[in-house]
Image (cartoon, rainbow, N blue to C red):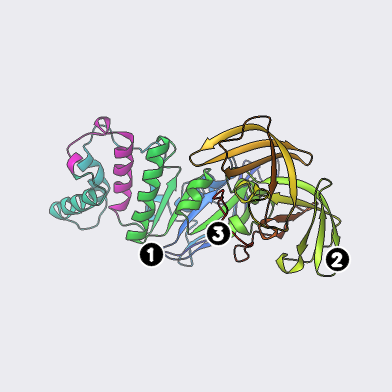
């Protein structure tokens, strides 16, 4: 296993002194031995460039890439002992599965005999449940089977690092869910430090030990899936992580003896100071409500805000529905149960527990209060079965 460290890594394409494009800006990330890091962010945020610098396919303009504390900036990609899995699988079409799996071992000067290589191929194929396909060529395989072969080709070398560049992007939704579970289980089983690039926050939240969220080449937050969801560093992270996207409203804030009075114009409520991460020294805040934390008023006793909305669209999702509506505060999205009697144009009164409300500085957009999972409202389980 390998400890991966990015120490002030910057990548500029073009002339840094003139019109160069900064793809990655002063990135500091440390990944402990055996951890699964996910690089998450929108297109163009620098996540693939970061992965390529780890793998040696790009050289940093500044900063160091370190494996176990040793700088590898000048080590060529083929000598870094990393295995990459790409979006397009990159299999050799004229070779069988058996040949694809064993090709890397035969190219390397590892002292393995043909019998030892064949045994390794068989073991990996059985692990990935493709042992019945060893004599097939890639063109005879489904997308999921090809992805397993690509994974097997990486695993069989027992590298220092696994690097995944959106490996599931070309698969259908159901197969993507199945494969991400298999990748997670596989990485846990072999225990090899891994870095995985995706723009899909559901994938990231499912498989990561640590998530590095990037935007415009800058690291926004590095933390566990729970941390980036419940305690996002800023508004960008809060809105990028979580589906449906967080509702955000502007509000005035006034400090009281043991609480902050939040005035949204259409709703006024207090948030106890014991729930707030930092002293609020601004007159205006951004108030965030996650759709799954909103629920219909009257379903349980609560002392949070209550506001009315008019339903525009109902999107059923199994036993729940994502409801989009108009309120005096602005557009609002809620994920609720008990939606079958509702229809477009109906009124819907919503509320939220104070401990689930997010607050951000209106100027800096930095977090002032996160979602406290240890604090619960009375009668937490409602008739709606709302996710909390």
Occupied quadrant, residue 377 = bottom right
| Dominant secondary structure (helix, strand or loop) of the stretch shown in magenta | helix
Residue in the foreground of this view, choosing between 180 and 44: 180
Q: Is residue 144 magenta?
A: yes
Q: Residue at x 31, y 52 (%)?
A: 155
Residue in the foreground of this view, choosing between 34 and 348: 348
Q: Is residue 382 visible?
A: yes
Q: Position of residue 57 (x, y in %)?
A: 46, 46
Q: CA distance from mark 1 to mark 2?
A: 53 Å
Residue under numbered circle 2 = 256
Crowd class of label 2 (few under 14; some 14 to 19; many from 20; radius 10 Å): few
Occupied quadrant, residue 9 = bottom right
Q: CA distance from mark 2 to mark 3?
A: 31 Å
Residue under numbered circle 3 = 226
Q: Nearer the viewer, mark 1 or mark 3?
A: 3
Is 316 drawn above or below residue 367 in the view shown? above
Q: Which residues are magenta?
A: 132-157
Report the side of 85 relative to 260 (left or right): left
Report the side of 87 relative to 101 (left or right): right
Q: Nearer the viewer, mark 1 or mark 2?
A: 2
Q: Position of residue 318 (x, y in %)?
A: 48, 39
Q: Is residue 146 magenta?
A: yes
Is 153 drawn above or below residue 161 in the view shown? above
Find numbered disc 3 in the image and state the secondary structure of the residue it sits on.
helix
Find numbered disc 1 in the image and state the secondary structure of the residue it sits on.
loop
Assign the C terminus to one quadrant of the image. Answer: bottom right
Residue under numbered circle 1 = 1
């Amino acid at each position: 296993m390998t400890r991966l460290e990015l120490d002030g890594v910057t990548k500029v394409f073009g002339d840094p002194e003139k019109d160069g494009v900064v793809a990655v800006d002063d990135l500091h990330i440390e990944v402990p031995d055996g951890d699964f890091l996910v690089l998450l962010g929108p297109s163009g945020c620098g996540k693939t460039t970061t992965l390529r610098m780890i793998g040696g396919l790009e050289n940093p303009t500044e900063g160091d890439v370190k494996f176990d504390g040793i700088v590898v900036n000048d080590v060529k990609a083929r000598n870094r002992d990393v295995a990459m899995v790409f979006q397009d699988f990159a299999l050799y079409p004229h070779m069988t599965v058996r040949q694809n799996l064993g090709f890397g071992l035969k190219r390397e000067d590892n002292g393995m005999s043909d019998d030892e290589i064949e045994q390794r191929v068989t073991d990996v194929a059985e692990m990935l449940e493709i042992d019945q396909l060893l004599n097939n060529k890639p063109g005879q395989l489904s997308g999921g089977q090809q992805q397993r072969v690509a994974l097997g080709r990486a695993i069989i070398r027992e590298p220092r690092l696994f690097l995944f560049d959106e490996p599931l992007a070309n698969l259908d939704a159901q197969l993507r869910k199945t494969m991400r579970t298999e990748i997670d289980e596989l990485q846990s089983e072999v225990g090899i430090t891994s870095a995985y690039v995706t723009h899909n926050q559901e994938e990231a939240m499912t498989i990561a030990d640590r998530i590095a969220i990037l935007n415009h080449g800058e690291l926004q937050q590095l933390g566990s899936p729970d941390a980036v969801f419940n305690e996002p560093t800023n508004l960008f992270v809060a809105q990028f992580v979580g589906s449906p996207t967080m509702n955000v409203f502007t509000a005035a804030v006034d400090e009281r003896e043991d609480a902050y009075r939040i005035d949204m114009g259409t709703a006024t409520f207090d948030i106890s100071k014991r729930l707030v991460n930092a002293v609020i020294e601004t007159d205006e805040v951004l108030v965030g409500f996650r759709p799954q934390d909103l629920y219909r008023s009257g379903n349980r006793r609560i002392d949070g805000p209550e506001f009315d909305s008019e339903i525009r669209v109902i999107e059923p999702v199994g036993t729940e529905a994502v409801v989009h509506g108009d309120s005096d505060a602005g557009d609002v999205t809620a994920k609720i149960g008990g939606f079958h009697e509702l229809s477009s144009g109906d009124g819907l009164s919503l509320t939220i527990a104070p401990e689930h409300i997010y607050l951000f500085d209106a100027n800096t957009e930095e977090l002032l209060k996160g979602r406290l999972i240890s604090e619960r409202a009375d009668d937490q389980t409602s008739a709606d079965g709302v996710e909390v």
